[in-house]
Amino acid sequence: MRKKPIPIAKPIIGRDVRKAVNKVLRSGNLTQGPEVAAFEREFSQFANERECVAVNSGTSALHLALLSLGIGAGDEVIIPSFTFAATANSVALTGAKPVFVDIDIKTYNIDPNLIENAITPSTKAIQVVHLYGLPADMTKIVEIANQNNLLIIEDAAQAHNASVNGQPVGTFGDAAAFSFYPTKNMTSGEGGMIVFKSKDAARVARLYRNQGMEKRYQNEIVGFNLRMTDIHASIGRTQLKHLLKWSKKRQDNAMALSNQLENVVTPFTPTGFTHVFHQYTIRVPKNRDTFADSLSNAGIGNSVYYPTQVHKLPSFNFPISLPQTQLATETVLSLPVHPSLSKKELRRVASTANSLIGQL
């Protein structure tokens, strides 16, 4: 009998979520309202009480974070190329230029030792990605930003509840963006949250998300419609209550995999860093794609995050060489680590991977 497939991700939608959504539906207040405001207040508790602005997606969160801090045409923003395209898209959509920097292959995050060489008179910000749930080296990056009078925007789409020396991601820079897409460590169905150091910047973001107005028909700037609905906020509020528990389960699952896997490079976590394992990403030294296909045929969900260097996408096509980024795109593979996995399933993931890697 063929074994039941183990998915790479599995959103947890419990009765409490259904109850919360039904409450909003019964209220008749479906658009941005009291649930959104409550979600912003509650998420702020995970961000050292900083200002929070809920929007309709993580990409919108990145875009509005940049716009609200004054990033625009003529500016340059330093980012990694080993990331999802939204990191670069959000910069380009402001009219600014993304400047791509290579990663540290051990962490998959931007290499702080390469940032200063990328700074020019036009550089206005560093947009850091906390990839796979592991924080970037924020101590060094904050020092570089301060020395060069640069803004910091944290792309924390995959890093809910991650931290460095006890300080949560999203609180190191001038703004941060979180995503609540269904596969993230918590979800609102769709949605995003911007965390701001400045109350003034947060107010600008609230204007941008709602047609440029705080009061109805009193439009102060040209804005968008990027609001989060109360339906989505009610899901997010419910999921937020489980975040600490789910983070711990991801960490336990990651440890179990690392203890069992053989002949692959398992994830690295520097001392003092809290990794929340949005993805459990290994590196396969050879024949990664063949290995991935074999895992899929055996019912083990897996995916390559990310197979293409962003600076080489047709939408950017920058003629530069980033060797560590290229190595990552050719060798990384993510395995299931989500909280719904049983110990038996974890053993199956590891044993299947060990068996197949030996056949390469």
Image: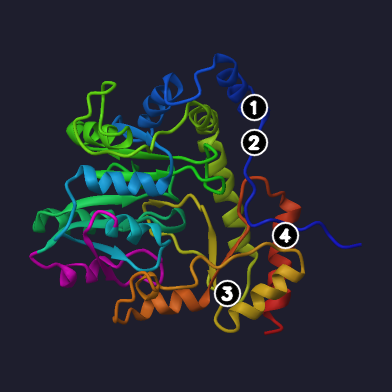
Residue 134 left/right relative to 236: left
Whether residue 22 is visible here, answered yes or no, is yes
Label 3: which secondary element:
loop
Disc 2 residue crowd, few under 14, some 14–19, many 20+, Cα 10 Å:
some
Q: Which residue is mark 2?
A: 13
Is residue 323 rendered magenta in the image?
Answer: no
Q: Which residue is mark 1?
A: 18
Q: Label 1 sits on what residue type?
A: Arg
CA distance separating discs 4 and 3: 16 Å
Mark earlier in primary sequence (3, 1): 1
Residue at 49% x, 19% y is 29
In this view, the mark in front (4 or 2): 2
Percent across and percent down for residue 110 are 32, 65
For residue 264, the mark is 3
Mark earlier in primary sequence (1, 4): 1
Mark earlier in primary sequence (4, 3): 3
CA distance separating discs 2 and 3: 33 Å
- Name the chief secondary structure element in magenta: loop
Mark earlier in primary sequence (4, 2): 2
Span highlighted in magenta in the image: 93-121
CA distance separating discs 1 and 4: 32 Å
CA distance separating discs 3 and 1: 40 Å
Q: Depth check: give the residue in front, 184 or 316.
A: 316
Is residue 117 rendered magenta in the image?
Answer: yes
**Against 219, is 163 above or below?**
below
Q: Residue furthest right?
A: 1
Q: Depth check: give the residue in front, 88 or 293.
A: 88
Q: Quadrant of the C terminus?
A: bottom right
Do the CB atoms of the residues marked 4 and 2 lie less than 8 Å apart?
A: no
